[in-house]
Amino acid sequence: MGGESGLKSREVSAMIKQGFIPDPTLSFSPSRTFSPPPSSTRPSQTQAQTHPQHTQTLFDMMSEEHKFSDDKRRKAQDRLSKLLREPALREGGEVRLTVVGRDGLRVSMEVRKSVLADKSRFFAEKLRCDGAVSHSVEISDCDDVEVYVEAVVLMHCEDLKARLRSMGDGVPKVLSLLKVSAAIMFDVGVVSCLEYLESIPWSEDEQEEVISQVEHLQIHDSAAEVLQRVSSDPSTADRADDIFLNLISGVLQAKDDKARREMKALLSKLLKENNAPNDSTRLDVSKDTLYHLCHKCISSLLLCLSEATGGGDERPDRGVVVSDITREADNIQWIVDILIGKKIGEEFVEIWAEQKELAALHSKVPTVYRHEISRITAQLCIGIGRGHILVPKETRFSLLSTWLEALYEDFGWMRRASRAVDRKLVEDGLSQTILTLPLLQQQAVLLNWFDRFLNKGDDCPNIQKAFEIWWRRAFIRQYSAEPDNNSQLQITLSDYPS
């Protein structure tokens, strides 16, 4: 007897766990109830008197948290009360449906069996039986009781899209409803949620949640339409470089300076986001495209300098010349900044070091026209000095041989004409670049600088720190490259007997 009782108890427990207890003897009135979980007890007065200051502070914190929790629960109960007053749930039905939240909140309602079975394949399977049989159904451990009740209300609606629109809670609520609808196989609800998501805007945070939920659920074909706004077409990868080329070229040729500055900043930010390592899924502008643009800009700059130094009867307009040279130099600086950010700037150092014709024309143009060009050299020295550009010593010396004189000549104008020029940054980058050269080349460069600085003062970069380091290397801490035979590692080979 006891064994039969235990067996029945286990069977009932299993049914409760599954959420379904069919009982043909039950009949219910159309009442709807919910019960809040028991509230936490307050600390005893004795405890509060034992440690007045410490316990009072802790009590205040607990009270605030309790107050916030109570307020949140009260709002949830208000919303649930409103839902339970919906006409669809006032009609009653043969199925007593109880939803229990993880926080203990419990809601009961009577629902027509025909609605549940017709709209949900899950309920249809569980409620299969003949006649007017009453059922008690409990769904336990729910994340959000309100969403489950809302899903039941949706089952009674003829225009689900209008209902979703009227909720006014946006993407998060619809995603919750989508998850519940998919779990109970409420197909019409799933389709309506997907169609709603497809038609409304998402924030970037919501976008990640939509993608995660829809991919995880692997539901209706409509899911593919929802994800179309974030799904790349295979042809996009093939055309990506052309798109990048058109965008960057558009900025380089822009006529409105303010718009040009804004779009430069925008593209720079977006291209930096593409620099994430070990992410093969990201499409990025190619090295070939960037260097193609570099060559175009250098050719345009060479043409501008040629026009500025051309000897003809017609003198070029000074304002136009300054504007053209400044624009082309700024274009090159921008692309070089992208190259350095992507750690592919080494080839440009070689290209810039070889611009002998450009450097010769540069020396013939008034400083007021040309000083922006020397910012390119300063930019490269900063990159080399920080270790962001790695080129052989021959290339480093060639760069300084071609452009250092021009940098000296333009430094005063660079410093005064542009707030964007950080004098210390330029001086540190130049110092470090010089100190990477062989000692004799350091000596030649720094002795030349010494004489120039004495005559130009603040209009010449102050690289005293580099001069001091060279001095110590040359005269105080001399290093001999001759091998020390006494310290060489001796290696002896011998055969071991087999």
Image (cartoon, rainbow, N blue to C red):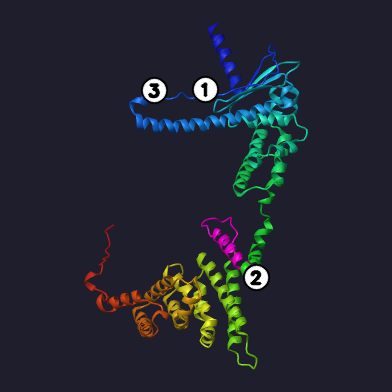
Label 1, label 2: how far apart the Cα atoms are: 66 Å
Residue 253: image quadrant is bottom right
Q: Amino acid at mark 3?
A: Gln
Along the line of sight, the residue nearer the viewer: 358 or 204: 204
Q: Using the image, tell me which numbered label, if any, was put on residue 45.
A: 3
Image quarter of the N terminus: top right
| Residue 261 located within the stretch drawn in magenta | yes
Label 1, label 3: how far apart the Cα atoms are: 21 Å
Residue 361, horizontal then vertical, whole percent: 54, 86
**Among all residues in the image, which is located at the extreme left?**
486
Contact, mark 1 vs mark 3 (Cβ under 8 Å):
no
Q: Quick one: label 3, few (<14), some, or many (20+) residues within 10 Å?
A: few
SS at circle 2? loop
Position above or below: 15 against 498: above
Q: How many marks?
A: 3
Q: Which residue is mark 1?
A: 38
Residue 199, horizontal then vertical, whole percent: 72, 46
Q: Which residue is mark 2?
A: 256
Q: Nearer the viewer, mark 1 or mark 3?
A: 3
Q: Is residue 34 visible?
A: yes
User: Which residue: 75% across, 38% down?
Assistant: 162
Q: Nearer the viewer, mark 3 or mark 2?
A: 3
Residue 75: image quadrant is top right
Position above or below: 113 against 306: above
Q: Amino acid at mark 1?
A: Pro
- Which residue range is magenta in the image? 259-284
**Among all residues in the image, which is located at the extreme bottom?**
313
Image quarter of the C terminus: bottom left
SS at circle 3? helix
Label 3, label 2: how far apart the Cα atoms are: 73 Å
Q: Quick one: label 1, few (<14), some, or many (20+) residues within 10 Å?
A: few
If you read the primary sequence from the N terminus, does the residue marked by circle 1 or circle 3 appear first? Answer: 1
